[in-house]
Amino acid sequence: MLVVEDEPTIATAIAQRLSAEGWRVEVARDGLSGVEASSRLRPDVVVLDVMLPGIDGLEVTRRIQAEHPTPILMLTARDDETDMLVGLGVGADDYMTKPFSMRELVARIKALLRRVDRAAQAAATSPADPPMTMGDVTVDRAQRRVYRAGEEVHLTPTEFELLVMLAGSPKTVLTRERLLAEVWDWADASGTRTVDSHIKALRRKLGPDLIRTVHGVGYAFEPPAGS
């Protein structure tokens, strides 16, 4: 585990709790050190603050993901949806707003690790799954790659799982609670805003028309006519 956090009290508390869970943890106190540590360690998960000295957490995320796909849980001091969407857009898998409970942080990290393990198992056991094509978007489930108009689009592991879940049941409304349970492995309905933020990130990357909002319920995948 890598924790990139410049507040000593917070960094120490996170590191101690994650160490108590049995994970080996290293702490970086600024953005450039975080990028270097990620390159050196290849951690299973990066817990990353948005506001950092040197380069901020968004740039750290861009650099880490450009070198090696890595699950990133982003911490933000502001409950600002724009910050959350930008973070998800540059490659974060999840986010939490300060202050947060250590218990929830550990639960989020464990859920993220389960999603990554599940994705690896799916790729290994389903190498012959044919790609899904919807309009100008192609989803290669075997290679875990997504293309739009022939250009590869970077999706985080969570975004990929969410897209496959929705596309696997076209025109079917899936509730936020079901998406949380099956994609995030969460049973807590308070996380439905997380679903909304990831849907917005998917729309920004793949276009606004593939996923329809059913107000008060959830989302439905709408394949383009003729696809």
Image (cartoon, rainbow, N blue to C red):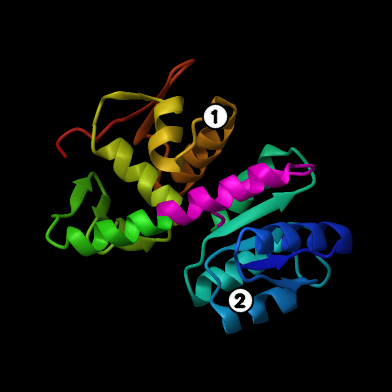
SS for dot 1 = loop
Query: Which region shows up in magenta?
Result: 92-115
> Which residue corresponds to the image point at 37% horizontal and 33% vertical from the top-left?
211
* Residue 157 lies within the magenta run: no
Image quadrant in which you'd find residue 78: top right
Mark identifier at residue 206 = none
Q: Position of residue 137 (x, y in %)?
A: 28, 50
Residue topped by disc 1: 188
> Which residue corresponds to the image point at 37% horizontal and 51% vertical from the top-left?
160
- Position of 191 compared to 14: left or right? left
Q: Nearer the viewer, residue 177 or 144?
A: 177
Give the position of the C terminus as an image quadrant.
Answer: top left
**Whole-number angstrom distance, CA of label 1 to CA of label 2:** 31 Å
Residue that protrudes farthest toward the top in the picture: 216
Of marks 1 and 2, which one's residue comes earlier in the chain? 2
* Residue 100 lies within the magenta run: yes
> Which residue corresponds to the image point at 16% horizontal and 63% vertical from the top-left?
127
The amino acid marked with disc number 1 is Asp
- Position of 173 compared to 48: left or right? left
Give the position of the N terminus as an image quadrant.
Answer: bottom right
Q: Nearer the viewer, residue 227 or 12?
A: 12
Residue topped by disc 2: 38
Image height of 97 relative to 124, above or below:
above
Image height of 118 relative to 98, above or below:
below
Q: Position of residue 109 (x, y in %)?
A: 57, 53
The amino acid marked with disc number 2 is Ser
Q: Nearer the viewer, residue 219 or 116?
A: 116
Image height of 77 relative to 128, above or below:
above
For discs 1 and 2, the disc positioned in front in the rendered view: 1
Q: Position of residue 119 (x, y in %)?
A: 34, 56
